[in-house]
Image (tube, rainbow, N blue to C red):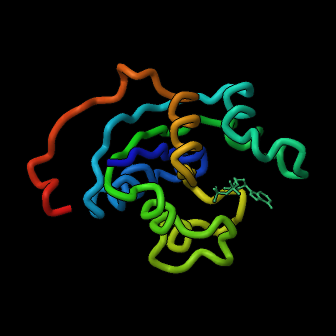
């Protein structure tokens, strides 16, 4: 079973979309393992987006992600990293298809509502940047056999 780190970005929180975004992952049958509001620090933001350090949009990205609270989450499910990226949609909102979270709700590219890890290595690193091990809740869902 795979875990991923998902984060409703400040635009999603401000627009009141936390519930609807979480519903997409619940509807798919994934399991919520942890969730909390975080006011991201500049250091934490730079760690999170380290792969983009040096790119022209890096400083704006750090400012954006630290501009207000985010809702950080850990979700679990089979192939969740690939499948959650499909539910989220393309980075560029002009390419994000209807039916995806970004395709349905996002209109401006940097403000694309949600972050999702793109590999098991990123997921492990990003999760550690936001959560302590004892914040992850282990429980069984009896419906898991179907999803
Ligand atoms: P992802 O969020 O779809 O994984 P990444 O390439 O990891 O996409 O980029 C991280 C975030 O940086 C994007 O979600 C978006 O908010 C912002 N971003 C990416 N590329 C650009 C760009 O070319 N201009 C402005 N912002 C960008």
In the rendered image, the vertical position of residue 141 relative to residue 107, given as above or below: above
Could you tell me residue 137's position as x and y percent? Answer: 28, 30
In the rendered image, the vertical position of residue 131 relative to residue 105, given as above or below: above
Could you tell me residue 70's position as x and y percent? Answer: 54, 38
Q: Is residue 26 left or right of residue 6?
A: left
Residue at image location 34% in from the left, 29% down from the top: 136
- Quadrant of residue 95 in the image? bottom right
Residue at image location 79% in from the left, 47% down from the top: 52
Q: Is residue 48 left or right of residue 4?
A: right
Residue at image location 53% in from the left, 28% down from the top: 128
Query: Which quadrant would the C terminus be assigned to in this image?
Result: bottom left
- Quadrant of residue 107 in the image? bottom right
Could you tell me residue 68's position as x and y percent? Answer: 62, 36
- Of residues 122 and 31, the one drawn nearer to the viewer in this rendering: 122
In the rendered image, the vertical position of residue 83 relative to residue 104, given as above or below: above
In the rendered image, the vertical position of residue 24 relative to residue 120, given as above or below: below
Count of labels in the image: 0
Q: Quadrant for ligand 1? A: bottom right
Residue at image location 45% in from the left, 66% down from the top: 87
């Amino acid at each position: 079973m795979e875990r991923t780190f998902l984060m409703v970005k400040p635009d999603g929180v401000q627009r009141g979309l936390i519930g609807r975004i979480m519903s997409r992952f619940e509807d798919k049958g994934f399991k919520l393992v942890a969730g909390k509001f975080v006011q991201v620090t500049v250091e934490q933001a730079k760690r999170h987006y380290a792969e983009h350090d040096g790119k022209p949009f890096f400083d704006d990205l750090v400012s954006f992600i630290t501009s207000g609270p985010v809702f950080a989450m850990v979700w679990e499910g089979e192939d969740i990293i690939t499948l959650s990226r499909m539910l989220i949609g393309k980075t560029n909102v002009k390419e994000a298809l209807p039916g995806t979270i970004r395709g349905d709700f996002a209109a401006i590219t940097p403000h694309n509502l949600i972050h999702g890890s793109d590999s098991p290595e990123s997921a492990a690193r990003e999760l550690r940047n936001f959560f302590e091990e004892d914040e992850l809740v282990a429980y069984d869902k009896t419906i898991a056999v179907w999803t």
